[in-house]
Amino acid sequence: MMSEPVLARSAATLQGFRIAPDDSNYFACLFDPLADGVNFTMVVEIFEPGGRTPPNTHQVAFESFFVLAGTGVARAGDSTLPLGPGDAMVLAPGVEHVVENTGTGKLYCLTVMTPNEGFAELIRAGQPVELTEDDRRVIRGAR
């Protein structure tokens, strides 16, 4: 349960995590059940050029992506969707999916999983990552 009636974060205070040492994506944590007592996880997912998620499926959670910057492609079920700034998608539970950065720069997605379904635990059990000034600039909406 949330301890405060309103939670707020600044790009300057966000923590970064990489789930596994060889992963090509990492996460800037905004809100999650472990830190904030909410029932969802909201992160900015940052993909290195050529980076991608491993194929994955969620049993009960919906996962949404909103592209902040960069270009990529999502493969979900039988669909392949190009992704660019301003594009959004929601994945239903049970749909195997992969998100891949196809651009020359980083791909930044606001990613929300609800309910959490262990996502925050997986992220926060990973390795801390120092967010770059470019990462923080994109998260702030500056170019």
Image (cartoon, rainbow, N blue to C red):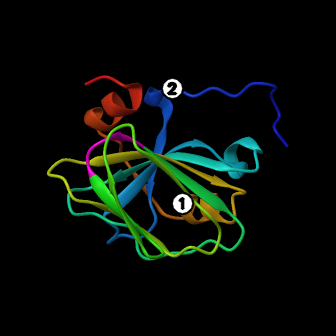
- Residue that appears at 25% across and 48% down: 106
Residue with the mark numbered 2: 10
Q: Amino acid at mark 2?
A: Ser
The furthest residue to the front = 78
Q: Nearer the viewer, residue 116 or 85?
A: 85
Q: Is residue 70 magenta?
A: yes
Question: What is the x, y in percent for residue 12?
Answer: 44, 27
Question: Which SS does the magenta portion mostly show?
Answer: strand
Quadrant of the image occupied by residue 138: top left
Question: What is the x, y in percent for residue 15?
Answer: 48, 43
In whole angstroms, how far apart are the C-alphas of marks 2 and 1?
A: 19 Å
Q: Secondary structure at mark 1?
A: helix
Q: Nearer the viewer, residue 14 or 88?
A: 88
Quadrant of the image occupied by residue 11: top left
Q: Secondary structure at mark 2?
A: loop
Residue 95 higher or lower than 99, as above or below: below
The furthest residue to the left = 104
Relative to residue 83, is residue 3 drawn left or right?
right
Say few, some or many: other residues with alpha carbon within 10 Å of mark 2 (under 14 / 14 to 19 / 20 or more).
few
Can you tell which mark lies on residue 123? 1
Question: What is the x, y in percent for residue 87?
Answer: 40, 43
In the image, the segment drawn in magenta is 67-71
